[in-house]
Amino acid sequence: MDSRDTAPDSWEQEDDVEAPDTELQSAFTGLNVNAPEFVPSFIPRGNPESTDQDGTDTVANMEISEPAAAVENGETDANTVETWEEKGDKDEVEPGGGAMEEGGAFGDEAQDEIMEEDEEMPAPKLPPPPPDAPKKEHVNVVFIGHVDAGKSTIGGQIMYLTGMVDKRTLEKYEREAKEKNRETWYLSWALDTNQEERDKGKTVEVGRAYFETEKKHFTILDAPGHKSFVPNMIGGASQADLAVLVISARKGEFETGFEKGGQTREHAMLAKTAGVKHLIVLINKMDDPTVNWSLDRYEECKEKLVPFLKKVGFNPKKDIHFMPCSGLTGANLKETSELCPWYTGLPFIPHLDSLPNFNRSSDGPIRLPIVDKYRDMGTVVLGKLESGTISKAQQLIMMPNRHTVEVLSLLSDDVETDDAGPGENLKLRLKGIEEEEILPGFILCNAENLCHSGRTFDAQIVIIEHKSIICPGYNAVLHIHTCIEEVQITALICLVDKKTGEKSKTRPRFVKQDQVCIARLRTAGTICLETFKDFPQMGRFTLRDEGKTIAIGKVLKLVPEKD
């Protein structure tokens, strides 16, 4: 036993001595964290006996490798000698002091921000303090709007302002973007990570990132604006608590986004259907020469939007908040801008922080609709926990196939935890199920309270846009929570009067645009769903056909299968 014990010990010591050179450098350049702050999370990893020798070693090593990291990521590798001294001096003054000298006042803000962030950042990485965890409420924010309105750029700018992306990384993006003659896109590259998205400047998948404010922990879901990728956007919106509708104020761009075929309308509607209660409308590109922070243009955009958002179902007094901003310059995102003295409200990030808390039932049944899955040392699934709490080593059931699975590990926004509450974005590593056996739209439940699954259900549907009439036998694609399935309208039960809510006595033979009806729908395969009354997040859906959103609806009752 002893001999076995000693072998890993010496390995660990050797490892500890070598590791800092490679791992720490990448960690430091990525996180912009001062060396001494990493000490506490590092020491406990060694064996208790070896900490004395190892602990001192690692600390010493870290001190050395901090300046080294600064050099190796810089452009000049050849003339290291000169830069060493310069870097050394700067580093003694303040780690990452480069930002200050280059950026002047702007660098100062960023620096303070990064310093504050430093004090917070290591916290989630340390296992010991669980009492701090529940303090910050998790809020998922989805950025929606027409293609090229500046959603990814605003997301990238927010990450920079809250210190989640350091200045050096952004400078690298800026250089690369300049080479491609796309210098205004560099901020969006923080969220559009794959090559195709960067080349075309269009988001395809829903980008994810997170940032923290004093009171809350936010997950940014950067939805694609292009109409070909609306299904991806629906998946993103179904995980969100709060939507930010980004509007371009630039002459011509606002109009195209808002016309019949534009995505501004469709996205706002889909967000409402996906269950987003609160909408923040960011009127972006106010710094554009055609706009120049003009109040008239801002009011004009606002006047056109309000009636439409009202029609979708948002209450302009309670649910909607308008604010001007500029994603590229970062004006009015974190601090108020002198450029628009007419806007008196809070800037964007403080406004998010001041929103009231969402009430979520942590004691409800477990419901976790799966957004995505992949294989990585086991089966990993991603999704947002809608209700209930999940803890490590818990036995859950994967519906509708009724596989029993065990949770091996839990990551909430890439930080490992032992249990997670509702509203958090989770990655779960599962045991007892293969990756091929899972599809997006499956749901993890607890064995005592399974979610309902079936193929036939009655729903109330509002036809939003459809050229001709819709009769029984009509086929469309159903998007319900994260699930996408083909569906057929098998019967129309009655029409509902929009104003009075009265139901017609006779069965309608067809429905047309702007009518509300109750219909029976049947899906091609078995899906998980709940009635809207019992569980709103899993009872609302959209129907799409030929790349357009045709109808939105809610599930009224589930029809049991006749055997």
Image (cartoon, rainbow, N blue to C red):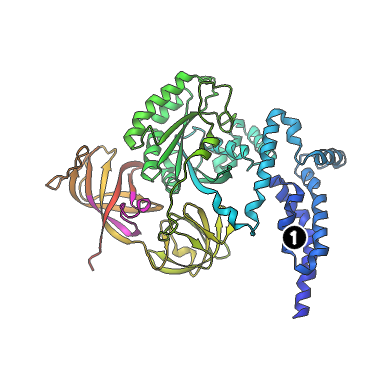
Query: Does 438 sit left or right of 504 as displayed?
Result: right
Q: Residue furthest left?
A: 506
Query: Does 513 sit left or right of 163 as displayed?
Result: left
Q: Amino acid at mark 1?
A: Ile
Place of residue 320 in the rendered image (x, y in percent of width and height, measured from the top left): 41, 34
Q: Which quadrant of the figure has residue 446?
A: bottom left
Place of residue 493 in the rendered image (x, y in percent of width and height, measured from the top left): 18, 50
Residue 404, above or below 102: below
Q: Which quadrant of the figure has residue 9?
A: bottom right
**Residue 523 lies in magenta, yes or no?**
yes
Depth check: 543 or 139 in front? 139
Place of residue 382 in the rendered image (x, y in percent of width and height, measured from the top left): 50, 56
Query: For the residue carrying disc 1, how many other residues have a C-alpha within 10 Å: few (<14), some (14-19), or many (20+)?
Result: some
Q: Which residues are magenta?
A: 519-540
Residue 114, above or below 106: below
Residue 505, above or below 366: above
Depth check: 284 or 183 in front? 284
Residue pictured at 68% horizontal, 40% vertical: 114
Residue 193 in view in this figure: no
Q: Secondary structure at mark 1?
A: helix
Place of residue 555 in the rendered image (x, y in percent of width and height, measured from the top left): 29, 52
Q: Residue furthest bottom?
A: 1
Q: Which residue is mark 1?
A: 43
